[in-house]
Amino acid sequence: MILIGSAAILWHVARIGRDDPLPENSMDADPVTESDAIAELAYDALIGSEFEQTHGWHVNLMPRMVLDHLPAGWRDRSFSKTYRDRLTVIVPTAADLLAPKIARNEARDRAHEAFAASLDLI
């Protein structure tokens, strides 16, 4: 599974041993997967789901084409971790994750860039 979006930025925060929340406490998970099992779990946690009401965050299952917006070579720079010998998560670097956000240049995206910079993630 490839993880992008807010959850991926927070994954990097956890990777450096921190637990800082994102600006605005925004949180969603944006996985890209070809696994039916992961897609089914993601579907159960979409915006407005009981999962979101219970946990305060949701999942946006993303199509593979969103990866085309990441900088060339992102996969070579990405991080990978396998959990419980069953799920391998691939996470682009924070700089690669932020590149499309910086290009979009919305206030939330600029805040995420500043947040990542403040933790030396970029």
Image (cartoon, rainbow, N blue to C red):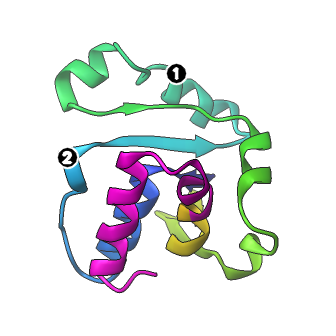
Specify the segment rendered in magenta.
Answer: 99-122
Rendering coords of residue 50 (x, y %)? 28, 14
Please give left or right for residue 118 compared with residue 120 in the image: left
For label 2, the SS is: helix
* Residue at left offset 54%, top offset 54%: 101
Rendering coords of residue 122 (x, y %)? 46, 81
Rendering coords of residue 102 (x, y %)? 54, 59
Up-down relation of residue 5 to residue 42 (above or below): below
Identify residue for label 1: 43
Q: Residues within 10 Å of mark 1 (few under 14, many from 20)?
A: some
**Residue 91 in view in this figure:** no
Amino acid at pointer 2? Asn
Identify residue for label 2: 25
For label 1, the SS is: helix
Q: Nearer the viewer, mark 1 or mark 2?
A: 2
Up-down relation of residue 22 to residue 59 (above or below): below
